[in-house]
Every structure is written in C-alpha cells, then in structure tokens.
Image (spheres, rainbow, N blue to C red):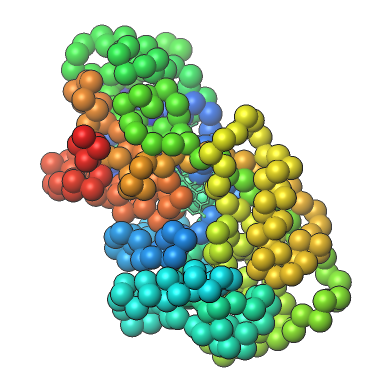
Amino acid sequence: MRFDFGIIGGGLSGCLLAYYLIMHDKRVLLVERNTIGSGASGTPLALINPATGRFAKKGFKSLESIAQIDALQRLSPFSNGYDFIQKRGVIRPCFEAEIAQKTHQNYLSDQWGKGVADWVTPDEVAERFPLINPSFGALIVHNGYVVNPKMYLQNLINWLSDHPNFSLLEEYEGVTYLSHKTRHTEELADPNYWVFRDEDIEMQADILIHCTGAEELIKAMIPGVIVKGQTLQFKLADSTYEDNSPLQVVTNQGNQTNNWSSFLKEYAISAQGYLCSLDGSNLVMGSTYEHRFSSPLPDSKGKLYLKNKLDRIHERLSSRIVQESMWAGFRFSTPDRMPIIDELPTYKGHYVFRGLGSKGLLYSHYYAKVFSKYLCGKGFLSKEVRLSRFK
Ligand SMILES: Cc1cc2nc3c(=O)[nH]c(=O)nc-3n(C[C@H](O)[C@H](O)[C@H](O)COP(=O)(O)OP(=O)(O)OC[C@H]3O[C@@H](n4cnc5c(N)ncnc54)[C@H](O)[C@@H]3O)c2cc1C
C-alpha cells in the first residue's frame, strides 16, 4: 500500500494534520506508538485560550486559530458532539497589582476587537464573579473552548477511519530515531519512500512527518525544552458553604448562577493554571510547570502545586475536593514558544511538526491547515515557524 504521507504520532498535531491532508484528497498513513491521544494530548480537559503568557497577551494568530476551530465545529461531522468540546468565556483574574497593570496594558494595546475580550475592574469582578477571590481586575476572553482532547481526537479518527484514503497503525513500535546522525531504523528500501511493516503487510509513504510531541529521540536537531504538567480531576463536596462565600454569580448574559457547577458551565478560569469543566460536575485543575522531573507519573508535589492554585482562585476551595484522581504529561516548547514546522536538514522528504507548547489545542488546528496547504504545494510556511529562525 502506498501513501502520499506517513505521519508519526497520533496527538493533536498528527491527527489534525492527517485530517487536513485527507481534505486535500491525499492518502495518509498515521502511525502511533501507543494509542491515539496517549501523549500530551491525553490531558483530561484543556482550554483553548487565545490569551497567552503571564500577562495574557493576545497570542500570535490566535484569532485566526479560533476562527479555524469555529469553522471546524460548524462544518465537520466528527465535531458535532458537544460532550467533548464546548464554548467558554475564559476569565483571567489578576491576583497581583503588577500582573493586573501589565495585563491591562496588554488588553489596551492588543486590540482584540469588539465583543472578543473585556477588561473588568476589581469592583466589577467582585460583583459579577463573587466566587473568585478579590483581585486587581480580570481579562475576559469570550471565545475560548473547553475540550476533552482525547475524546475529540478519537472522534476525529473514527470519522477518518471510514475514509478510503486513510489508514491507522496503532501500537506500532517500529519507528525509532537514534540520533540526528543515524537513519530511520525502518530501512529505506528505495530512497524515494519510507517503509512500514505490519506483520506481512508493507506500507510505503512518500513523505514522512514527525508529529511526536515531547519525544526525546530527535531532540538534537530541534531546540526546545520538555516541560512536565499535571492535572487534578475532582468533584466538589455538595455541602453548603462554610466560608461565607456568596452564592449568587451574575454571568455575562445577566443570568443568575448560584454555584461552581453553573459558573463553570459558562466560564473557565486561567490563572497560571486552569480550572474548567464540561458538565459542571467533573472539574479539572491543570498546569504545565515542571522543568526538572524524575518520574513521568503524577506526584504529590504536583498535587500540592495545583491545590495552591485552586485556593488562589477561591480560598479553601481545595478543602472541598472529593473523588480526586491525577494525570501527568509532557509538552515540548521551543525557545520562542512558536511551533517548528519544517523539513529536517538531514533527510529529504522528512518533516517535523511539533513544539505546540502550552497552546496545542489552539494552534494545532491553524498550523495543521497551514502545513497541509504547504505540503500540497498550495501555500507557504512563514519564517516564524521554520527551523532556520534558530540559526
Ligand atoms: C498537563 C498538561 C496540560 C495542558 N493543558 C493545555 C491547555 O489547557 N491548552 C492547550 O492548548 N494545551 C495544553 N497542553 C499542551 C498540549 O497538550 C500539547 O501542546 C499538545 O497535546 C501537543 O500535541 P502533539 O501532537 O504535538 O504531542 P502529543 O500529544 O504528545 O503526541 C505525540 C504522539 O506521538 C507518539 N509518538 C512519539 N514517538 C513515537 C514514535 N517513535 N512512533 C510512533 N509514535 C510516537 C506519542 O505516543 C504521542 O501519542 C497541556 C499539556 C499538558 C501536559
């Protein structure tokens, strides 16, 4: 079987690239070492948030990226299930004066556009969102999403699997890169294509694309760091408030909501870590933060870190946690926090698409589309994402 493209890695970057290449009528083989969404893209819930960094700057191409996700939501049969992706306003409360000042400055200079984002003064935050601790103001971005990325990808792949031009190899261990000097362990039978073998079946791909996230093995060629992150999944005890928290929340639409469950069905919170929910009952607090780690597993240090973040959002919120579980994963970030999309200098026909950092949900859609057009000879790659920017 011969494919136009062999994509290594079934995370957000690999799956969405496969989708857009299929939309260009290309034949695509997707190869995953484990299962779909088993890397960083397996985080239990994540935010699509157009604001980025400590001071909530409007992310590069973030509105284009959101528009791309909106379009996919409207048009694609695989994304019609609202149980794994839902629109949310994203609130960025500022709990320090300096952060508030810089975030406000960014809001004024970023020109978000009418109705896209608002700056909310401390008094307005207290009045509209009394569940949140007193703050120095907040940015609200109205066009975010909360996503269960793994379910999202599984639905996408189920849909792609019915397509005659698409094949998936899961639990395939055959792709191993030892260093930038050694060759792909699958022998190049012919310098013009790459070979995969699954039992007796040989599959060939003209072009190979590496979408392997935080995979260490070709790191020598790609500048960046691997950052560990953790999530805490939990429910909140149904008890009445013991801490005199106000129970009424006036939402953006002027509706009254009276608890975290209703609140999180309309908003997510991003405050050096994120708190969100799809159904209002199962909550996730998550963050990527750890550059030095010894174990790939979730740990108590990470749990404490996340609980402190929760209590920052609302005092003693962590004391109401019940039914908790944890998850850990790794993201790959480049020095300038922009993805790397390019042909590798070592082998012709061997490309890389990685480094989505903490914005994988936001950028995978936009850049997979841009990259697919480039690979089909219908577009170009800007210098911001090419490897040559690091020279
Ligand atoms: C705790 C945590 C919270 C996060 N929260 C958010 C968030 O709220 N919003 C957001 O936008 N982003 C968030 N991110 C970042 C986001 O998850 C990543 O940017 C994104 O998932 C990266 O996708 P990827 O496809 O590049 O990598 P991955 O999802 O890691 O996919 C890479 C895949 O390649 C496979 N693979 C690797 N090597 C091989 C090989 N040799 N052969 C075959 N397969 C291979 C792996 O098994 C894996 O499935 C978070 C990350 C973490 C860890």
From the viewer's side, name the closer residue of 263 and 100: 100
Quadrant of the snapshot with the C terminus: top left
Up-down: is 266 above or below 17?
below
Would residue 23 be visible to someone looking at this image?
no
**Residue 311 as seen in the image, left or right of residue 268:** right
Residue at position x 42%, y 22% in the image: 217
Q: Position of residue 329 (x, y in %)?
A: 57, 40
Residue at position x 70%, y 58% in the image: 308
Quarter of the image holding residue 259?
bottom right
Residue at position x 65%, y 75% in the image: 132
From the viewer's side, name the closer residue of 294 and 129: 294
**Residue 298 as seen in the image, left or right of residue 206:** right
Residue at position x 56%, y 84% in the image: 122
From the viewer's side, name the closer residue of 180 and 184: 180
Q: Position of residue 71 (x, y in %)?
A: 34, 63
Q: Position of residue 205 (x, y in %)?
A: 27, 24
